[in-house]
Image (cartoon, rainbow, N blue to C red):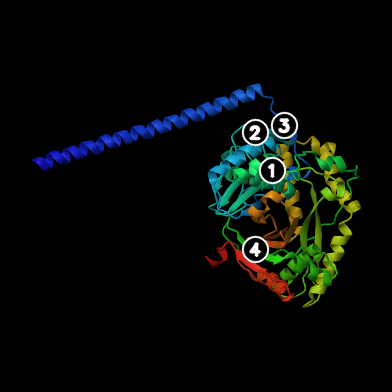
């Protein structure tokens, strides 16, 4: 009888605890709902009393909203590696402090009758998350508080992923460095006490549309040639899955090797990339089509611009294999010739002016966006056959001296795009050049050729991957 009473008491206590837990859960849910409603009311009140700023897209940015989707995200990543594990709460706080200072990031994309435009975003910053999937995924702004970038972390790494409509790699780097500086000041208060809480003098907040500032009215004659390129094909990873291989090498060794060939570092590594394609995919055999690689050119040095918006154009490096087993020197000579003929201010101005003139033609300006977007997508897919890959060089990255001891390295990733199943990015920090090859193809033959040939040239290379090739 006593045992029965004890069991009944225990059941009653469990029921009471269960009711209390449910009540507490309902209360938490109610509080969350109230806070969400309060936040909405604050945002509505802010919108009513605040004049919302808006801004036009730059010339290049018009392309990206028209062509972006889950299969072709047009998102790039710049990552910074610290020498200590990331504290998520401090990173979120740092984002909240830095974002309002960067108008090009603190915005949302709106659709007008004839063009897209940016509007100031009054919502809270996007949530910082721990990385748990593949990089450079499509950014669904409706699930990201209408922002067009994301910040994540993994162990010691901070990842900034940016929809290209906002800015290019230079603008993304400005934002990421300031985010890292602010984070370090929060984690290490002595940095703030000694150096203050200001933006670095290296950072630009300039939002000039440098395309419009520097174009010259064109007769709409094309400033570049676009034939058909050899396209890289093979067995693909499932959609969204990406293979990444980083190669780290002393930049001085690369410079010395390139100098022996009478080439710049960029010419040498672009030629090496094309040579690896020639060996891995064509097996040293002739090809009906040339191997063409797109090379983005930062226009800021050519036109004395400090804009934080997009300001680049594409040039093409190419090699047409017409005989069996042509040596690397043939590839390098072709790359040097094609790049040097395009990397002049006069030619870059022609390309820039051609692109801007197309945007400013009265016929195109008066076509509604609902009809304009399919046309833009069609033209893009047609031109996508003109290039097999992209090689982009972010150059030598420097940070403010007071933060150097906390920062180990940087790397850059590009998402695949139509016709381009492989891309390579280059960046240099503290004497180490990092070449990162991102691929949607399962085979690593091309990457092996690339890094082994560098090693055979006397360059010390250490390699690491994201592990998908071993799954």
Residue 455 position, x and y percent, is: 70, 73
- Mark found first going from the N terminus, 3 or 2: 3
Q: Nearer the viewer, residue 429 or 78?
A: 429
Which mark is in front, 1 or 4? 4
Q: Is residue 320 visible?
A: no
Q: Residue at x 82, y 42 (%)?
A: 210
Q: Which residue is mark 2?
A: 121
Instruction: Say which element carries label 1.
Output: helix
The quadrant holding residue 243 is: bottom right
Query: What mark, if any, has residue 54 been given in the picture?
Result: 3
- Please determine whether, in this image, residue 310 is positioned above or below residue 40: below
Nearer the observer: mark 3 or 4; the answer is: 4
462 relative to 388 in the view: left or right: left
Instruction: Kindly identify which residue carries mark 1.
Output: 65
- Of the image marks 1 and 3, the number of the one nearer the N terminus: 3
Rendered image: mark on residue 413: none
Position in image of residue 70 (x %, y %): 61, 49
Using the numbered discs, state the Cα–Cα distance from disc 3 to disc 4 in whole angstroms.
39 Å
Q: Separation of disc 3 and disc 2 at Cα?
A: 10 Å
Element marked by disc 3: strand
Residue 329 at x, y = what percent? Answer: 82, 73
Residue drawn at 64 percent across, 22 percent down = 48
Residue at position x 62%, y 46% in the image = 184
The Cα atoms of the two marked residues, 1 and 3, are separated by: 17 Å
Tell me, yes or no, if residue 180 can be seen here. yes
Separation of residues labelled 1 and 4 (CA atoms): 29 Å
Badge 3 or badge 4: first in the primary sequence: 3
What is the residue that sits farthest to the top in this orientation?
49
Q: Marks 4 and 2, Cα distance to the nearest angstrom?
A: 36 Å
């Amino acid at each position: 009888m006593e045992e029965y009473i004890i069991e009944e008491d225990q059941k009653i206590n469990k029921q009471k605890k269960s009711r209390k837990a449910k009540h507490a859960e309902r209360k938490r849910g109610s509080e969350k709902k109230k806070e969400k409603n309060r936040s909405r009311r604050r945002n509505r009140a802010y919108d009513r009393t605040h004049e919302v700023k808006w801004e036009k897209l730059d010339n290049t940015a018009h392309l990206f909203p028209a062509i972006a989707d889950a299969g072709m995200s047009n998102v790039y990543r710049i990552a910074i590696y610290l020498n200590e594990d990331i504290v998520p709460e401090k990173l979120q706080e740092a984002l909240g402090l830095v974002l309002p200072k960067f108008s090009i990031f603190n915005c949302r994309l709106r659709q007008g009758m004839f063009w897209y435009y940016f509007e100031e975003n009054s919502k809270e910053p996007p949530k910082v998350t721990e990385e748990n999937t593949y990089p450079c995924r499509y950014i669904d702004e409706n699930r990201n508080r209408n922002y067009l970038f994301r910040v994540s972390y993994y162990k010691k790494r901070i990842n900034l992923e940016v929809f290209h409509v906002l800015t290019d790699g230079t603008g993304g780097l400005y934002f990421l460095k300031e985010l890292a500086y602010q984070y370090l000041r929060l984690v290490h208060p002595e940095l703030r006490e000694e150096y203050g809480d200001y933006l670095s003098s290296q950072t630009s907040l300039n939002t000039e549309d440098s395309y419009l500032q520097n174009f010259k009215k064109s007769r709409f004659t094309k400033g570049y040639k676009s034939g058909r390129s050899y396209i890289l094909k093979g067995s693909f990873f499932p959609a969204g899955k990406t293979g990444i291989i980083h190669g780290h090498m002393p930049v001085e060794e690369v410079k010395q090797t390139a100098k022996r060939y009478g080439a710049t570092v960029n010419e040498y590594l672009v030629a090496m990339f094309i040579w690896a394609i020639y060996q891995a995919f064509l097996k040293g055999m002739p090809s009906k089509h040339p191997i063409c690689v797109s090379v983005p050119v930062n226009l800021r040095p050519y036109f004395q611009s400090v804009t934080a918006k997009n300001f680049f154009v594409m040039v093409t490096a190419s090699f047409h294999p017409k005989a069996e087993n042509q040596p690397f020197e043939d590839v390098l000579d072709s790359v040097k010739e094609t790049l040097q003929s395009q990397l002049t201010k006069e030619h870059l101005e022609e390309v820039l002016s051609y692109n801007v003139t197309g945007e400013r033609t009265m016929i195109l300006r008066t076509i509604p966006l609902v009809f304009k977007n399919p046309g833009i997508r069609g033209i893009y897919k047609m031109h996508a056959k003109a290039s097999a890959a992209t090689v982009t060089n972010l150059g030598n990255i420097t940070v403010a001296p007071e933060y150097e001891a906390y920062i180990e390295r940087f790397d850059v990733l590009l998402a695949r795009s139509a016709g381009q199943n492989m891309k390579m990015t280059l960046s240099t920090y503290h004497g180490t050049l990092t070449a990162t090859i991102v691929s949607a193809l399962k085979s690593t033959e091309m990457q092996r050729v690339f890094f082994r040939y560098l090693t055979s040239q006397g360059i010390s290379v250490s390699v690491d991957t994201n592990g998908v090739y071993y799954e």
